[in-house]
Image (spheres, coloured by chain):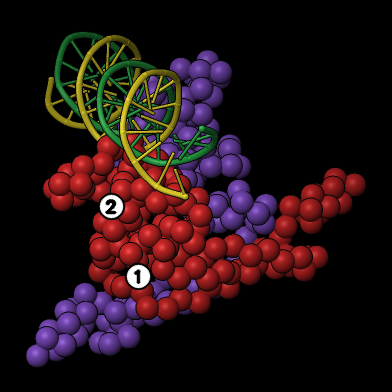
Chain colours: A red, B purple, C green, D yellow
Amino acid sequence: MNYESCLKEKKIKITRGRVVILNIIYNSLQPITADFIYETSVDQGNNIDLSTVYRSLELFASKDIVDKFDLGDGKYNYKIKEYKHKHKIECSCCHKKVEIDCPMIPIEELIKNKTGFVLLEHELNMKAVCQDCLKKISENNEK
Amino acid sequence: MNYESCLKEKKIKITRGRVVILNIIYNSLQPITADFIYETSVDQGNNIDLSTVYRSLELFASKDIVDKFDLGDGKYNYKIKEYKHKHKIECSCCHKKVEIDCPMIPIEELIKNKTGFVLLEHELNMKAVCQDCLKKISENNEK
DNA sequence: ATGTATGCAAAGTATTTGCACAATC
DNA sequence: GATTGTGCAAATACTTTGCATACAT
């Protein structure tokens, strides 16, 4: 099965619960909540305990299978992590570089919620200073 | 007083609690939680009830005085909304435009937490399609 | 067979709310 | 003085956890 190979890849033990949960997330176009997943599993007759839902979601998030984010309503939403490109940030001072996972997923959802606009592409350029250089700068200022 | 004029501008009634809370947020360099504000008010001897803290923060957020966001740990952080520039999004299809408040504040905090890098500038370009055009496109596909 | 996952029930944490009293304009 | 804010206590919402049993490899 489709979902099972996804789990195998990540060395996650395949269980009925995890397959059901992953299936529900895959088949949802919108980001969904833990409770929605629980309710859907009940409706399907594939009753999974809510605590199992939370435990599985936590596992999936830690393995980069799903994105977990808050849309401002005090609960988390989950969706399949479709593309996971990175963004590079370079320190303007020492030119050290770090990579971060694209942070735009929750923003895309927020924009969709607020304006109805669905993002197709984004370009994000950031200028930043790293901790080390920040410290050096503030030490020099003290002299 | 400084904070009072900020409240007056927004037509918010000036009370001891609100001034204390605003003062605590203003004097914090980091984003802080409701509970931290409560504890700080207690330490200062300006004891404000936790429910008042929440009610005030909600009010401030609705009046664009503070930013409210989640850093992934199940509680909200608050900080003064310093600059509130906008980003324009244009529909790639009908060229309708919408403006949104800059969505980068929570992302800046996340990056600071994860990498230590402090953002100085960002440039964000987005391509999107509006609801109306999305509908038209999917209707045409059905024909 | 061993280690891991699950259900159940209970606990924990963050946030919200109703109400009587107090403070502000 | 009318309206709005506050403290207190209780409720709610979401998420986590301990433990005994069930399951996957």
Q: Circle 2 marks a residue in which chain?
A: A
Q: Is residue A64 or residue B139 the one in the foreground?
A: A64
Q: To which residue does mark 2 refer? A: A20
The residue tagged with tag 2: helix, strand or loop? Answer: helix
Residue A44 visible in the current orientation: yes
Q: Is residue B103 left or right of residue A48?
A: right
* Residue underneath mark 1: B99
Q: Amino acid at mark 1?
A: Glu
In percent of width and height, residue B2 lies at: 51, 39
Callout 1: SS: strand
Asked if one can make out residue B14 in the rendered structure from this viewpoint, the answer is no
Mark 1 vs mark 2: give the one in front. 2
Q: Is D20 placed above or below B36 here?
A: above
Q: Is residue B105 left or right of residue B121?
A: left
Quick check: marks 1 and 2 in contact, CB under 8 Å?
A: no
Is A56 or B66 nearer to us in this picture?
A56
